[in-house]
Amino acid sequence: MTQTACSPFRPSLTVQEQPPELSSSETSVVIATHSLDRFVMLNRAIDSVMALRPAPGEVIIAVDHNPELATKLTSVRNDIRVIEHTGSSGASGTRNAGAAHARGRILVFTDDDVTVRQDWLIELTGPFDDPLVVGTGGRTLPAWQGVRPRWFPDEFAWVVGASHAGLPESQANVRNVWSENMAIRREAFARVQGFRQDFGKVGRVSRPEDTDLCIRVSDALPSTCWVYVPSAIVDHVVPEDRGTLAFFLRRCYWEGAGKVELSAHLNGYQDLGDERAYLGRTLPLALVREVRQGRFPRAAALIAGVCAAGVGGVRALARFRLRR
């Protein structure tokens, strides 16, 4: 993750100019969901957010094209707001629908298969006392439902929606954060019209809509910065079927394709240095470590993951050039 120019650790204005500290009541937590099959997980996610002290100002559940799920939620819970999304299907549009109904000046996003830790909201929103901080993101830990595969490398934790090895261990300015553990000023979110609705997770296809959002916000508000807060911790459920090599390779493929599409959407935006650093430094160091320690299945997975992402990227680039 690239360091940015502004500092989240030092007030950017004089004492007389400082805005009042953010209250938890000024936050709106938005959880996107779409399937009745995830109802139990969704309720666990909601319960973890509702148990926060101090509590957020409101919790909004945005339901993607599932009236039955929306009705069931409304009938069993009176502590949340349920919003039905009827626009373009997918995670991006669903999150935007929830945000459109939010009243807080800080929008907080998490997912229906995530549970939050007790200090999560306090930690995640703490950097907003600096007016130059436009958004924050926290650490996501994998909650494996089965046995974690012995071959699975820590550097590829993003495959299962978790924070990968190599991220900062302390609070730091970064280029982007991730939507299952993200907070952003509502005005900034509105400035770029939220997540790109034609670019994101739909079904089994995953694209980096959160990276796209962060880059577009930084481009629109160049004096601001994003802050990674590793003490803002959430746990992300990893079903057993995501611990397979087939899922690993498929997810790597779509990540490679998604990053090429991201670059195309941003007209060749030059700030893809994080990916170059990840490929050029983080992964080679990990490969050397695994070989030296005799963990050859992990070493093989590192190579296979890079190859799968490369194939996805090359095919996406070829499709893009044909369209042009």
Image: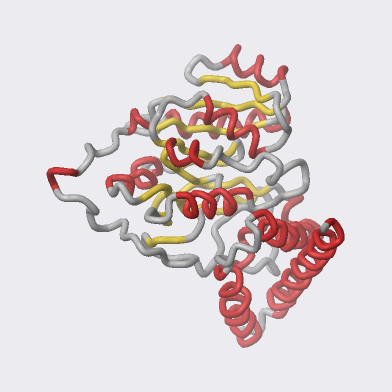
**Where residue 18 sits in the image (x, y, percent)?**
20, 43
What is the quadrant of residue 279 in the picture?
bottom right
- In the displayed structure, 295 sits above or below 100; it is below
Question: Residue at 40% across / 29% down in the picture?
Answer: 104
Image quarter hosting the C terminus: bottom right
Q: Residue furthest top?
A: 75
Question: Residue at 17% across / 43% down in the picture?
Answer: 17
Q: Residue furthest left?
A: 16
The one nearer the camera, 39 or 200, is 200
Locate residue 161 relative to residue 307 in the image: left or right: left
Question: Residue at 58% across / 33% down in the picture?
Answer: 96
The one nearer the camera, 85 or 230, is 85
Question: Residue at 15% across / 50% down in the picture?
Answer: 14
What is the quadrant of residue 268 in the picture?
bottom right
Q: Residue furthest front?
A: 324
Q: Residue furthest bottom?
A: 292
Image color mode: secondary structure
- In the displayed structure, 42 sits above or below 140; it is above
**Where residue 229 sits in the image (x, y, percent)?**
40, 54
**Where residue 173 sits in the image (x, y, percent)?**
40, 61
- In the displayed structure, 73 sits above or below 42; it is above
**Where residue 274 sits in the image (x, y, percent)?**
55, 68
Total residue callouts: 0
